[in-house]
Image: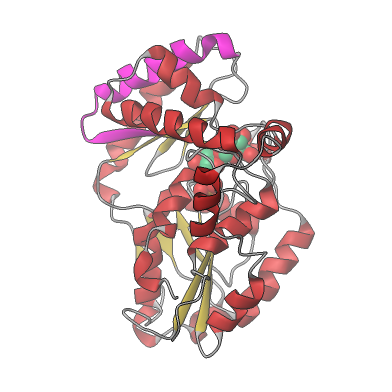
């Protein structure tokens, strides 16, 4: 096949971003349209700060900068967007075309292929809100997902714990991969389960189960250690823990970052990363949303298949692990 400019599924991620009007930093999302010139610099700074965060060698200023850029408002993103285009930015755009802008090419690339849908939850199916317990998806979105799932195998891939994301989505015909892909379960509905490949009945995969007691411990330690920081919220996502700072006064962000880092240091088998105004604490195992995507395709009988087209829509840094699974990229 002649090389065309469409690349699937990476630009589908950009489509998700197009729907969201995203952030110009890798901690949050891809760009909807030309990424703002200013965004490139922010992206580099964020990357540096994020690396420091992971390595535990960061300066307080670096973390705070990374925290500030982790989930900008639409107004900030739009202002950055208006800042203009330069060569570096144009080159970035050539490598990351908008899937919405190139939708016909995406459709053409899907001809004769089995589409498998992967959907992130927060910021993709539901709006970003202050209270993580109130991130409900609309009935319209639920109907859209239900109709997609009638045509294609569909999975929700979330950083949340699987039960929680199921409570929000409420569709028994879907696959669910909670805890950043570390808790995978096949459809609960009898009808959908009957349609699953025979070797895949009742799939359940939990590659980090040995970490359960440690996650409980770190959750308790984090709750105790952040109690004095108003607005900080610790969420137990079963195989990982989120520490939210969306409602923390910016003056306390440095102290919060220090506290979280200090606690995580007590657990050398856990690592720290950052999402949209949230710290994510996870096992050091080599498992992420990309691995979950591969596992699910494998379970569905599409391992090393050339006639499958995975479509992944997400808005956060952890979704980029799935965008990077390039053995399914088609040119
Ligand atoms: O993989 P996802 O489904 O996108 O989950 C990632 C995290 O999403 C949630 O936090 C984010 O959404 C909250 C509600 O809108 C918002 O308040 C928070 O600032 C965002 O980071 C969820 O609460 C986390 O546990 C997930 O890890």
Q: Residue at x 70, y 75 (%)?
A: 147
The vertical placement of 86 against 56, above or below, is: below
Q: Position of residue 242 (x, y in %)?
A: 46, 34
Q: Depth check: 310 or 87 in front?
A: 87
Region rendered in magenta: 250-273
Q: Depth check: 61 or 191 in front?
A: 61
Q: Position of residue 305 (x, y in %)?
A: 36, 83
Q: Is residue 2 visible?
A: yes
Q: Depth check: 108 or 230 in front?
A: 108
**Residue 149 left/right relative to 140:** left
The vertical placement of 7 against 281, above or below, is: below
Residue pushed farthest left?
Answer: 268
Q: Residue at x 39, y 40 (%)?
A: 240
Q: Is residue 260 magenta?
A: yes
Q: Is residue 203 visible?
A: no
**Main SS, magenta residues:** helix
Q: Quadrant of the C terminus?
A: bottom left
Q: Position of residue 263 (x, y in %)?
A: 32, 20
The vertical placement of 144 against 239, above or below, is: below
The vertical placement of 150 against 320, above or below, is: below
The answer to which image quadrant residue 272 occupies is top left
Residue pushed farthest bottom?
Answer: 112
Residue pushed farthest right?
Answer: 140
The answer to which image quadrant residue 56 occupies is top left
């Amino acid at each position: 096949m002649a090389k065309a400019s469409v690349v699937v599924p990476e630009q589908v991620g950009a489509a998700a971003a197009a729907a969201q009007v995203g952030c110009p930093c890798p901690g949050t999302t891809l760009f909807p349209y030309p990424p703002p010139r200013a965004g490139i610099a922010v992206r580099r700074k964020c990357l540096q700060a994020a690396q420091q965060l992971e390595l535990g060698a960061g300066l307080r200023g670096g973390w705070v900068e990374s925290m500030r850029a982790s989930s900008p408002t639409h107004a900030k993103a739009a202002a950055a967007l208006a800042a203009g285009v330069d060569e570096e930015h144009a080159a970035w755009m050539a490598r990351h075309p908008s899937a919405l802008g190139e939708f016909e090419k995406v459709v053409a690339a899907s001809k004769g292929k089995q589409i498998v849908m992967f959907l992130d939850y927060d910021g993709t199916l539901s709006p970003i809100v202050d209270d993580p317990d109130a991130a409900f998806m609309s009935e319209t979105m639920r109907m859209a997902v239900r109709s997609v799932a009638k045509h294609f195998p569909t999975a929700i891939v979330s950083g949340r714990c699987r039960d929680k994301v199921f409570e929000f989505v409420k569709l028994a015909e879907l696959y669910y991969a909670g805890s950043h892909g570390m808790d995978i379960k096949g459809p609960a509905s009898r009808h959908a389960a009957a349609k699953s490949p025979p070797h895949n009945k009742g799939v359940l995969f939990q590659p980090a189960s040995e970490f359960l007691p440690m996650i409980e411990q770190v959750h308790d330690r984090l709750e105790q250690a952040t109690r004095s920081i108003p607005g900080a919220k610790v969420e137990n996502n079963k195989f990982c823990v989120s520490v939210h700072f969306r409602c923390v006064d910016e003056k306390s962000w440095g102290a919060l970052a220090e506290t979280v880092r200090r606690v995580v240091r007590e657990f050398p088998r856990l690592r720290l990363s950052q999402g949209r105004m949230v710290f994510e604490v996870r096992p050091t195992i080599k498992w992420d949303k990309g691995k979950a995507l591969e596992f699910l395709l494998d379970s569905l009988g599409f391992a090393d298949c050339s006639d499958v087209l995975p479509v992944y829509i997400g808005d956060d840094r952890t979704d980029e692990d799935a965008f990077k699974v390039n053995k399914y990229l088609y040119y």
